[in-house]
Amino acid sequence: MKNEHTTLLVIGGGPGGYVAAIRAGQLGIPTVLVERDRLGGTCLNIGCIPSKALIHVADAFEQACGHAGEGALGIRVRAPEIDIAKSVAWKDGIVDRLTRGVGALLKKNGVRVLHGEARVIDGKTVEVVSAGHAVRIGCEHLLLATGSEPVELPSMPFGGHVVSSTDALSPATLPKRLVVVGAGYIGLELGIVYRKLGVDVSVVEAAERVLPAYDAELVRPVADSLARLGVRLWLGHKVLGLDKHGAVRVQAADGAEQTLPADRVLVAVGRRPRVDGFGLETLMLDRNGRALRIDDTCRTSMRNVWAIGDVAGEPMLAHRAMAQGEMVAELIAGRRRQFMPAAIPAVCFTDPEIVTAGWSPDDAHAAGVDCLSASFPFAANGRAMTLQATDGFVRVVARRDNHLIVGWQAVGRGVSELAAAFSQSLEMGARLEDIGGTIHAHPTLGEALQEAALRALGHALHV
């Protein structure tokens, strides 16, 4: 077996792993990255990017269908049709361009990429098997960036017409009836896509409302949208399994059972850190449940073994992994860094979208901090009116004593693009007066931030 040595060895070529490797290369650190599949990881190949591409397809198709009748805009078209194979090919083209770009960036920065299966021998040695050939690589630093995987239901394992989000993002055909198990962001994003493309969609959720991780006020416009779209909701129901015909058996809290016919079943009940299958158990690292325990520099319980991204637990967000990866590379290069963001924004790409950063009013109350909050509705925003997107609002949360902003939330069409402004104001320690006194371009959705801040100060102008 061939033996090699490097300073940094990264297992996993997803957003966290490849960013860490690129930054390490920029800093002159000899780096090897091992990826068993395609560069870009879950996010780029079977997650964030392809799902947003299909969301765009579904939105465009819905708009075209709306113009087929007597639409308010005066546009008339013939009833549209969807060629899902062509849509998937377009989506795959985007993924291909991005994965090639990642590969080019790694090469540009001197990172050696090995495509193969990694197996951890110890904290400084990894064996990589590719195309029947094995190489043993010694390293001074080992970075674990193995990501996460879909959670499988014991009563409904993946296979046949039961699919994960991976399969749902590359459909060869559209089913007539889709049952989605789980009303979190993954289930609802994909459920809405399929419904807009003409599929009969039912969503089963054990909680009493959709998106249970978000507060009820934020979720209400999404629930209204689901009703408008005709998505059937089975809230407060648990899944029992499949009957002999492939239908989904569900049970209400009172014990009553229902059977939901399904041509396809999407199980989207969450993701879990990927810690099996590559010898990680040999290191006996400390854990938080299934996730690897890390400190505020992403160090694990073993010296010079680092972990970033989903394998280190919640929040499982690509941008968190990227920020951690960049930091670890700089720490290895001898710089002083610490992972202590004021907030990590999160976006739910439903229709309408939800974006959060920092504390909600409930979070502030739970922390025992006296805060005030105020919202500005998009119904009073001129740009939202011109986009036919008046559902939703922007909400700000600030300390009552000094008006320091501690959180932002928004729900509405396109509000994901407000995430940067939300996070920036929190990182820079902005106060209500800072946002209220900043001139915002008119007409834009972003004016809602200024109006929310002014409303919290007691002198909103347009509501």
Image: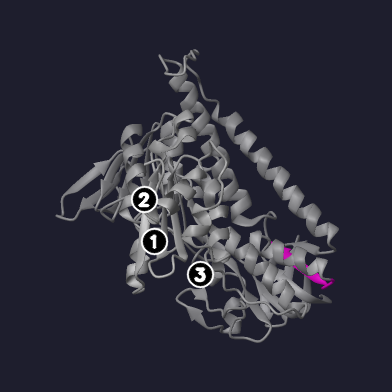
Label 1 close to label 2 by CB (< 8 Å):
yes
Amino acid tagged 1:
Ser
Q: CA distance from mark 1 to mark 3?
A: 21 Å
- Numbered mark located on residue 218 in the image: 2
| Disc ID at residue 360 | 1
Which amino acid lies under the numbered mark 3 shown in the image of this protein?
Gly
Where, by quadrant of the figure, is residue 428 drawn?
bottom right
Residue, x 43% and y 40% (percent of image)? 351
444 and 231: which one is in front?
444
The answer for how far apart the CA atoms under marks 1 and 2 are is 10 Å
Residue under pointer 3: 313
Q: Compare residues 108 and 170 and report the one nearer the observer.
A: 108
Tell me residue 113's x, y (percent): 78, 62
Residue 10 image position (x, y, % from top left): 71, 70
Q: Is residue 123 above or below residue 249?
A: below
From this view, report whether residue 18 is shown above or below residue 50: below
Q: Amino acid at mark 2?
A: Leu
Q: Residue shown at 85%/57% (left/top)? A: 108
Helix, strand or loop for disc 2: helix
Residue pictured at 33% horizontal, 33% vertical: 228
Specify whether residue 403 is in view: yes
Look at the numbered disc 1 and give the secondary structure of its residue. Answer: loop
Write the start and end of the magenta stretch as one range: 28-35
